[in-house]
Image (spheres, rainbow, N blue to C red):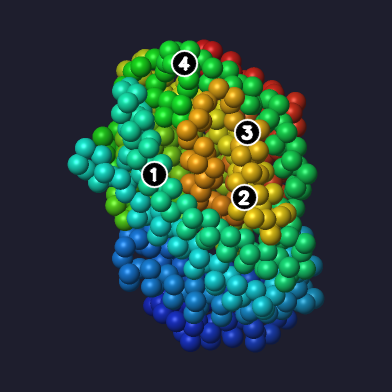
Amino acid sequence: MDAVKKIERPRRKFLPDTFSLTDWPVLKPWFDNLLERTIESAGDLRTWFKDRSELEAVIAEDFAWRYINMTRFTENEDYSKSYQYFVENIQPKIAPVSDQLNRKAEASVFLSELTKEAGFDIMIRNLKKDIELFREENIPLFTEISLEQQKYNQLSGAMMVELAGKELTLQQAAVRLMSTDRAEREKVYHKITTRRLQVKQTLDELFTRLIALRHQVAVNAGFANFRDYMFTAMGRFDYTPQDCFNFHDSVASEVVPMLNYLTHERKKSLGVTSLKPWDKAVDPQGRDPLKAFTDGSDLTEKAITCFHRIDPYLGQCLSIMKEMGHLDLESRKGKAPGGYNYPLAEIGVPFIFMNATSTLRDMVTLMHEGGHAVHNFLTRELELNDFKSTPSEVAELASMSMELISMDEWDIFFPDAEALKRAKREHLEDIIETLPWVATIDKFQHWIYENPNHSLEERKASWNKILTQFSDSITDWTGEEVAKDFLWQKQLHLYEVPFYYIEYGMAQLGAVAIWRNYKHDKEKGLQGYMNALKLGYLKSIPEVYEAAGIQFDFSSAYIRELMGFVKRELEKL
């Protein structure tokens, strides 16, 4: 492979290269410069936007490292305090000044000249949206929300169980749910569930506080509810809540019957009289779990090779991250749950965090986060930070497409032909399970925030009603009703990034369409994928999807067409 190019932070043009963010007084003069500057031409305004972009990139990257360190080491008080300090003492000061800067830009007579250029039109649309949403009284509420959200990470990071004398994270323990010994699976399931349910009341109360705070933010900004507020805040200019409801209905009619069929086949293959929740992860043919890698280092090397085979540029991206220490992949005690690719706005080389053990799912997670990382590399040269900040419907298209595009190279992880077939089959079946779960979480959020004053009993009833609509009718939950009642608590998005979930469903459909193009013509399919990602947020969501050679569509007919393709690919395996 090619030698790894070292990437360095670009030279700053506005801030000194030695600038370091410690507190508000060191930041304030730079904001004052932007606020007080005279703008006498479109060129001046463009330079002003570039300087603002540089300042915001420096701030964003500083905050990113505070967040990354806090989630990597949840028990480290210094990291927690550093994150809290930013949230309590820096963020609240930035918010009102950002609003003043937005208003200064909007008032400029030269703004209309820039709106004619690709990217500036979308950035200015977002800027006007931010002006519309800004309320001084929401600043302390956002601080409180950030601190409450942090508690979810701390509670989750502290969850451990003991198995065979070893203390394991819940992610590590969950691997044992693939055991071919049913009694072992049941024991592990109950250990994990019991540990989760120990904090069910704490998590319920935390969620109730978050709902109240978020609803107040929405009301302060003149919205009927937090859902409507978030649709504006997230810049969902290209679809409406009704489109989400159409997505839910399409998944219920087109995907849930496929899920039912797969679950019925699983029950038959396992030869059980009743399929229990601990029977969902084991191989239905009774084979040992697939092992995709041995440890984080092995996973890294194999992933780099896999990406390099698709295109040398992709392999370079991961190699650079490895060299720079921007990968933390293995599960360990004191580490927050989940996985993410965190963009680093100034240097342009992101950080991947995840909780790998050894499973296929872990390997796919790295393919997913690697897709996000490639997206960051492809947009790092764009002129302004705003141009790189893609909406999540596009961001998740990058990651979920990479999961499928990479499948042709999975022999790196599974040299045995039968294991490779099985891995591909499991991943395609996972798509059929993912879409209904996305619909479940999204529909639950709509209900939660349309009914912010609901009781805990109403919450439980609503959750179960929605879960039933999108679940298979085969799994027997008898005796596990309490676990089922609180299944939603494991979804960190509900606590930390509300309304960020439907994007996975939309992007999953887009990813299947990109994969279909790729299967038809690898070179053209990959080029379409890369062309779309390079656009960043210079174009609208439908235009980015169009650049990839696919549609932005949630209709039953389109979902039926794409799921038909997945079904045919499954049959080939």
First along the sequence among labels 3 and 2: 2
- Dividing the picture into quadrants, the one containing residue 439 is top right
Q: Residue at x 70, y 72 (%)?
A: 134
Front disc: 3 or 1: 1
C-alpha span from label 1 to label 2: 21 Å
Q: Position of residue 143 (x, y in %)?
A: 54, 72
At label 4, which amino acid type do we have? Thr
Which mark's residue is nearer the viewer, 3 or 4? Answer: 4
Q: Residues within 10 Å of mark 2 (few under 14, many from 20)?
A: few
Is label 4 in a helix, a strand or a loop? Answer: loop
- Which amino acid type is marked by label 3? Thr
Question: Would residue 469 be found to the left or right of residue 150 on screen?
Answer: right
Q: Position of residue 444 (x, y in %)?
A: 64, 46
Where is residue 395 shown, x and y percent of the image? Answer: 57, 47
Q: Which residue is mark 3?
A: 468
Vertical side of 481 occupied by 89: above or below: below
> CA gap, disc 4 to disc 1?
25 Å
Foreground: 473 or 417?
473
Circle on res. 194: 1
Spatial CA distance of label 3 from label 4 is 21 Å
Q: Quadrant of the N terminus?
A: top left
Which residue ends up furthest to the left in the rendered image?
A: 165
Is residue 509 left or right of 491 when viewed as pictured?
right
- Type of residue at label 1? Thr
Q: Residue at x 46, y 63 (%)?
A: 150
What residue is disc 4 on?
273
Q: Position of residue 133 (x, y in %)?
A: 72, 68
The first of marks 3 and 1 along the sequence is 1
